Amino acid sequence: MSAPTTTDGPRVYRGLAHREGTGWIAGMTPVQAFLVIAVCSPALLAMSRSRWSQTLGWGAFAAVVVVLIVVPIRGRPAFRWLADLIMFQTGVLMRWSPWQSRAAAGLAGDRTEPDLPGVLSRLEFPDGPEFHGARICLIHDTAEGRWGATGRLTHSGVGMLSDQECERLAARLGSMLAGLGHREVVDRVSLLVRTVPDDGSEYEVWRSRHEHPDAPDLARRVTAEIDRDVAGVSVRTELFVTVSGTEEALRRPAKAAGGGVAGRAYALYRLLEGVTDSLQGLGVRSVTWLTSTGVAEAVKTGFNPATSASLSYRRLVRPDTDGTVGLPISQAGPALAPAPDARAYHHDGYSSVSYAVQPPESGTLFGSLGPMLAVRTAGERRTVAIHYEILSQAAGARVVRSDRFRHNVLIDAKAARGFATTEADARDRRGSREQEAAVAAGHAVVRFTVAASVTVPSDWNVEDHAARLENDSSGRFRLLRLELAQDSAFVAAALPVGIGLPRQKRAFDS
């Protein structure tokens, strides 16, 4: 979805992204239009028979229902808000929402069996066969029938790169997504960046091993004072990538590889090397595909950032034979997660607020998500996740043809009835033609979503930190707070397990 506005300066990415579920009939979807007609029919029928009292009664009822169906409030129709609120309050009253781990309850369990709350309960984490000397942990989403793997990346960032280098990285990212679409095995890629408060554990271990015993006392005191001042505001950044494919796409290559979990693992492994090479072309220095203990650590530190220091110290001081922490997958989740609030999620002594990030109509620049990761207070944790789904060539062609047909029909219908077309209509029509031409030339259609979150200790005022995140994104992106779904939104924004995109309805072009 890129289009340079001028020949000089950074490239602006604008204009070719479409929201899913755009209505055909006066902005309504066919389901909404059918419901509106159905609810208005009794009033119209009573009017045709001159029964004015019944017309008034049915008209008032229809007006209320039409408002609930049609009027959008913060991204959701009023009827959807009402249904979500009823489900949310039902879960709270029936005590379905509070969650406590088996370990916190004093119950014994299998170390290889995950114990996770909410939408994470549908995940399984079987170990695959060896891949470059390690048994990669597979992430099996039993609800959607997906198999994936997560890798930890090291990258120097893009803050110091020139406009030309950023444009080159964007082009390579598009090439990587298009290449995965042509393979039609892995169709989802999730990139997660999150900050981690750095308490200096790694530095302390390094100093204890390299400190000279005869160093002057003054030098020791000055160094200790500097360490104390710097450690309080130090922040590290973690970067993860998760790739996954559907059961249907993996079935044939998995059967050729022997079937079962091992066959699906081998089918994924054949793609992981290509993904690694593509990521290195994006400036990634190293890609480490995580074992079950690595995934457990990534999930645990997502719920409880304070455990990052102890796990890091244990890994440095007492590493296992394979160099991992040794945290079993059964202990990856939080110990306690009370019933979530409508506007926040509480877990293991922390509170999080999560958002859906909506790109502006005016376009955005490569790297413009960076300010959302700018931590304002020591102890605060921020995350940004981008989830991509690459559609097959056939599905992408259907999507762009449908968009072009819809825009043409709407504009022609306005012109036939004497209504003036707006610049937005002309832009959408022009964009749909460009999309169809791009797909015909071999480009991929990509669904995507962006999620962000901020996490602070539960005794802090989380609303203050949420407001700061909103301030950092204002003028660049619009943040839509995912109320009544903060627990699921937290998973999409802060945990590298590949959950974040809803089931496909329509598609975005990228």
Image (cartoon, helix red, strand yellow):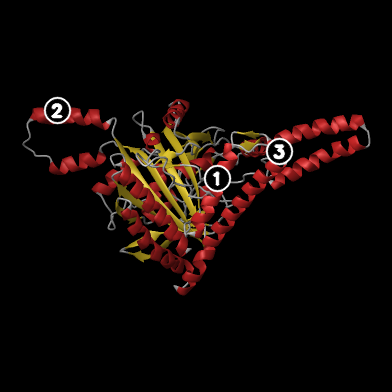
Of marks 1 and 3, the one in the foreground: 3
Q: Which residue is mark 3?
A: 418
Q: Callout 3, which amino acid? A: Gly
Residue 172 x %, y %: 36, 53
Q: Label 3's element?
A: loop
Q: Earlier in the sequence, mark 1 or mark 3?
A: 1
Q: Callout 2, which amino acid? A: Val
Gap in Å between the C-alphas at discs 2 and 3?
Answer: 79 Å
Of marks 1 and 2, the one in the foreground: 1
Gap in Å between the C-alphas at discs 1 and 2?
Answer: 57 Å
Q: Label 1's element?
A: loop
Residue 472 x %, y %: 41, 30
- Which residue corresponds to the image point at 39% horizontal and 40% vertical from the top-left? 6
Residue 266 x %, y %: 41, 67
Gap in Å between the C-alphas at discs 1 and 3?
Answer: 26 Å
Q: Which residue is mark 1?
A: 18
In the image, taking residue 102 as reference, residue 59 lies left or right, namely right
Q: Are marks 1 and 2 in contact (CB under 8 Å)?
A: no
Q: Label 2's element?
A: helix
Q: Which residue is mark 2?
A: 222
